[in-house]
Amino acid sequence: MGKVALITGITGQDGSYLTEFLLGRGYDVHGIVRRSSVFTTERIDHLYKDRHESGVKLHLHYGDLLDAISLRRIITQVKPDEVYNLAAQSHVRTSFDQPVYTAEVVAIGTLHLLEAIRDYRDSTGHEVRFYQASSSEMYGRVREIPQNEFTPFYPRSPYACAKIHAYWQTVNYREAYDLFACNGILFNHESPRRGETFVTRKITRAATRIKLGLQETVYLGNLDAKRDWGFAGDYVQAMWLMLQQQDPDDYVVATGETYSVREFLTEAFGYLDLDWEQHIKFDPKYLRPTEVQILQGDASKARNLLGWKPSVNMRDLCRMMIDADMKLAERERTLVDAGFVV
Ligand code: NAP
Ligand code: F7E
């Protein structure tokens, strides 16, 4: 029998890459999906088979991190060997508008899940390994560069505060209840599947649409912020590696390089022979009340103990995203030329 994994946040960017990766390793993958009035499974549709077909390895369950009973029911039914907690209200700017909701999902939702796993393990004797999607945002107002597992946290958003709560709950369940629980402290990671309101994807979508005459301008906030941007496909492998070790632990996952939003703009627009300064306008709406000015990770521990290293740098990541978004823009252009409103 292959292993069984349960993923919260399976419909998100990371959920889709992790699902691909685990299916490729022979896992049965179960994912928790929130009920919505529209389909939200676009990122995993290419992996999904109708449950009436034979050899189905991907299974979806309705549930929500806010609904503890649904989590307990799904865990009892699925009997997972590994649980990856990727679900979150993950947008930092939005967390200032919805701080309580963000804390409920990110902090209390994680606690619901840990409690469900603890009770399931204690009542069945079945070991469940747990991965928590922690974030470089927890470092916030950094005083040392680069940041590693010993760098103190100084959160700068409701999102980061909630992630720190979940981080320490994960550590405490490991120490108090002997749960195999790990935090991956992942620095920003992007891909063609990145949500369109995060800055890299916002830029690559806009640059390709501008190139094809579908829009003229894009509004952005702070161009001076610096981030350590890697490729999501690389980062999900680190999540899995953490759960395959002898002992549970916490790891930074990062490229070690940092670039400003302005440098990402230059790379993206330059690749398309465009001058970004002709197309970018400032909108204070995109500023945060408190900003994280710079993040740069030191992933030496992951490299030495997990044997993990990134395979895509910022330039190649940016080009990968532009190439994928150009295909979307070309489709839109065709529709517009045929008289459709997009
Ligand atoms: P994402 O694309 O925003 O995906 C978030 C996922 O969580 C979606 O599947 C979403 O479902 C689900 N979700 C939201 N609220 C939920 C709830 N109440 N119950 C159940 N599911 C819920 O995020 P991502 O970029 O893949 O990131 C994955 C995780 O890593 C997140 O926890 C994020 O905070 C963390 N993280 C991300 C980065 C990064 O750079 N990407 C870095 C460090 C940490 P819908 O599809 O229905 O919205
Ligand atoms: O912003 C600046 C903005 O929203 C990056 C999440 O996955 O990574 C992500 O959080 C920077 C910030 O990502 C716009 O002020 C300028 O300094 O793409 P972002 P984030 O806030 O770093 C961490 C690790 C996570 O854990 C989170 O879940 O770009 N910026 N102008 C802008 N940002 C956005 N979104 N939109 C703008 O127009």
Image (cartoon, rainbow, N blue to C red):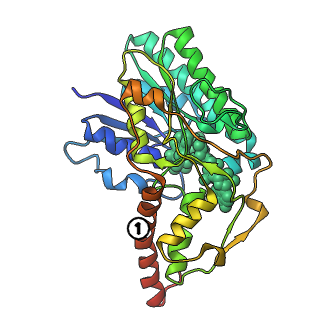
Q: Tell me residue 231's x, y (percent).
A: 44, 49
Where is residue 148, by image quadrant?
A: top right
Quarter the N terminus occupies: top left
Residue neighbourhood size for the residue with mark 1, other residues' Cα within 10 Å, grouped as few (<14), some (14–19), many (≥20): some
Q: In the rendered view, does 43 fall on the left or right side of 97?
A: left
Query: For the image shown, how many numbered marks are present on the structure?
Result: 1
Tell me: residue 198, above or below residue 127: below
Give the residue at x 47% y 30%: 300
Q: Tell me residue 22's x, y (percent).
A: 32, 38
In the rendered image, is residue 133 in sight? yes
Q: Tell me residue 66's x, y (percent).
A: 61, 35
In the rendered image, is residue 77 in sight? no
Q: Tell me residue 13's x, y (percent).
A: 47, 49
Label 1, secondary structure: give it: helix
Q: Which of 322 and 12 lies nearest the eye of the viewer?
A: 322
Give the residue at x 55% y 78%: 210
Q: Amino acid at mark 1?
A: Asp
Q: Which of 248 and 277 lies nearest the eye of the viewer?
A: 277
Tell me: residue 91, above or below residue 171: below
Q: In the rendered view, does 10 fall on the left or right side of 24?
A: right
Give the residue at x 60% y 58%: 199
Q: Which of 280 and 40 lies nearest the eye of the viewer?
A: 280
Beta carbon of the mark 1 residue lies under 8 A of ligand 2: no
Q: Which residue is mark 1?
A: 323
Considering every residue shown, the one lying at the far left of the view is 54
Give the residue at x 60% y 33%: 147
Q: Which of 90 and 340 lies nearest the eye of the viewer?
A: 90
Tell me: residue 316, above or below residue 278: above
